[in-house]
Image (cartoon, rainbow, N blue to C red):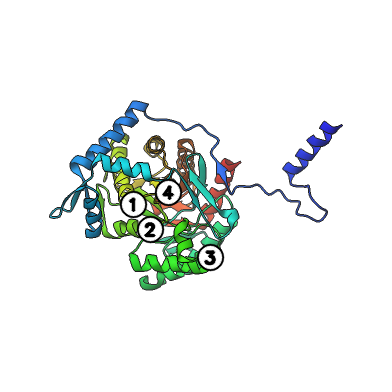
Amino acid sequence: MIDDAARDLRRERRRGRTGDAGSETSRRPDYRSLKNPFLPQPIFSVDQVAAIHDTALRVLEELGVKVLLPEARTILARAGALVDEDSQMVRIGRDIVAAALASAPKSIRVYAGDRARDLTLELGSMTFLAGSGAPNVTDLERGRRPGTLAAFEDFIRLVQHFDVLHMLGPCIEPQDIDNRFRHYAVNRAQLTLSDKLPFVFARGTPQVEDGFEMLRLARGLSEDEFRLGAHCYTVINTNSPRQLDIPMAQGIIDFARAGQVLIITPFCLAGAMAPITVAGALTLQHAEALAGLTLAQIVRPGTPVVYGSFSSNVDMKSGAPAFGTPEHVKATLGAGQLARFTGLPWRSGGGSAANISDAQAAHETQFALWGSVLAGATVCIHAAGWLEGGLSVSFEKLITDVEALQTVAE
């Protein structure tokens, strides 16, 4: 009898029907803190991963990275890197990179507006973000059009509603807001319409500092409290091949000094700005990610850094980016191996190159999603709503992609 009662109680709990009379009876699945249940799938052997890592270190030592920001070159030079001011090339020794990898945290606790939304970014955890960075928005009723603040706010409301989308992102560019004031509008929308971890653009120190101050005011944090924890993040993209431009280098410095999360992501498309082979593209990606990570750790040892990967291929007939392809999946699996080699939490990328939310869009997004899941990605950006290789985000596609994410979460 006791065993029968316990079994019935467990069954009722699964159905969400326990509790006092009048309590909510609908099923409420918990998607807020997901762990990846799948064993990571390899694409390379152990010795091949070690060879890619070693080759990436040789790239940094012998060929170097072009760093356009003078302050960043000075910081790297003080740490022992070889700097040629005429060419702006910086050659970073493997001992400097090793020290940076040793100081980078393997687990990052990030604090949202609600403690129930806090996340731990580490190998084995699984978080999803909506499509980000698009200049256009699309839906069936109004068609494809430039992004606006109203559309951005609607996307934030949708992301807030779905627990399987764990962090906020810059879904679209609100082009109806002047560039000088756009960061105020974007930050205000995130901080007033959601309690999830916000994104802050790295577009120059003044705008970054504005974002930090708005966040401190919204969360009721002193400057010291803000710097003692990670309360926001940004994405740093290198300019492949082997270049770190001024805004991105400055963003690394600004976020590192404030102790906020940096997702350092090379965007390497095989056949365009990266070698045509998956191994070659990942070697370049790994070198660029390590260069950005090293700069961050020199500025402030212990800076929370997420290893970034967004490698795919281009259509060799048109030169257009392609996603959800075999090469995209292989590159994601290989990036997961490299991330585990370093022990760092890491970011992958989903998405689709389809022009509308159709069967092609669903097919490409699903393959990109499963590549990320089977590679053990900590953070998957562009997991919902992304179209046209990032030129637009679709309201309808965000909803259909959320269904896929919830299936994975289950």
Position of 375 with respect to 94 (left or right) is right
Q: Are marks 4 and 1 in contact (CB under 8 Å)?
A: no
Quarter of the rendering occupied by the C terminus: top right
Element class at badge 4 = loop
Per the image, the residue denoted by label 1 is 296
Crowding around mark 4 (Cα neighbors within 10 Å: few <14, some 14 to 19, many 20+) is: many
Residue type at numbered disc 4? Ala
- Callout 2 touching callout 1 (CB < 8 Å): yes
* Image mark for residue 255: 2
- Residue that carries the numbered disc 3 in the rendered image: 219
Give the mark nearest the N terminus, 2 or 3.
3
User: Total number of numbered labels?
Assistant: 4
Q: x and y percent of residue 127 in the render? A: 51, 47
- Residue at 35% in and 60% down: 254
User: Between 133 and 227, which is closer to the camera in this rendering?
Assistant: 227
Give how far across and how far down residue 300 sits, in percent: 35, 53
Name the front one of labels 2 and 4: 2
Please tell me which residue is depicted at 20% across the width and 49% down the height of the picture. 90
Q: CA distance from mark 3 to mark 4?
A: 39 Å
Residue 47: mark: none
Amino acid type at circle 1 is Ala
Residue 183 sits in quarter: bottom left
Work out whether mark 3 precedes mark 4 in sequence or the reverse, and give the earlier one: 3
Q: Label 4, on which residue?
A: 354
